[in-house]
Image (spheres, rainbow, N blue to C red):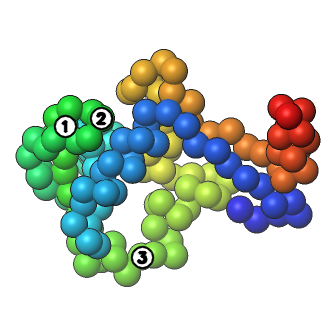
């Protein structure tokens, strides 16, 4: 995050837990994804991205889930600076980034909350109020 103030983020909920489980059970240097993510990713039929089904796997705390490996063709691997995912932080994200930035709460439980932003000073004030 770029700016004058240092910001902290707290991530809560089912989407964060699911992402952690995907990371923990993936092979090194592989991007493992859930079926919901793959459906969102492939809805625009982006060229150079393929999703290989890994099958149904037992995921701790989630039961069984169909998981995939997201693979990029060589042309995508060289596009680190100008990739759609890095452009998503610009003021005008492209169509792929917009699809990936959907609210994960739509696909999971209502109690999930994705991001809460805390400027450093404000976070300290809130901690003091709780005590």
Marking on residue 61: 2
Give the alpha-carbon distance from disc 3 to disc 1, as whole Å. 31 Å
Q: Is residue 95 visible?
A: no
Camera-side mark, 1 or 2: 2
**Residue at 77% from the left image edge and 55% from the top image edge:** 7
The disc, 3 or 1, on the residue closer to the chain's N-terminal end is 1
In the image, residue 124 lies at what x, y percent?
87, 47
In the image, residue 40 lies at what x, y percent?
33, 40
Question: Relative to 13, is 116 on the left or the right?
Answer: right
Camera-side mark, 2 or 3: 2
**Residue at 83% from the left image edge and 45% from the top image edge:** 123
Depth check: 125 or 48 in front? 125
Give the alpha-carbon distance from disc 2 to disc 3, as whole Å. 36 Å
Residue named by callout 1: 65
Give the alpha-carbon distance from disc 1 to disc 2, as whole Å. 11 Å
Q: Is residue 36 visible?
A: yes
Residue named by callout 3: 79
| Numbered disc 1: secondary structure | strand
């Amino acid at each position: 995050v770029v700016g004058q103030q240092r910001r902290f983020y707290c991530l809560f909920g089912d989407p964060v837990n699911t992402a952690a489980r995907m990371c923990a059970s993936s092979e090194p240097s592989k991007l493992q994804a859930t079926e919901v993510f793959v459906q969102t990713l492939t809805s625009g039929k982006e060229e150079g991205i393929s999703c290989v089904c890994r099958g149904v796997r037992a995921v701790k705390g989630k039961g069984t889930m169909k998981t995939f490996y997201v693979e990029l063709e060589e042309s995508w691997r060289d596009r680190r600076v100008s990739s759609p995912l890095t452009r998503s932080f610009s003021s005008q994200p492209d169509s792929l980034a917009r699809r990936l930035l959907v609210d994960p709460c739509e696909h999971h439980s209502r109690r999930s909350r994705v991001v809460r932003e805390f400027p450093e000073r404000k976070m300290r004030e809130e901690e003091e109020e709780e005590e």
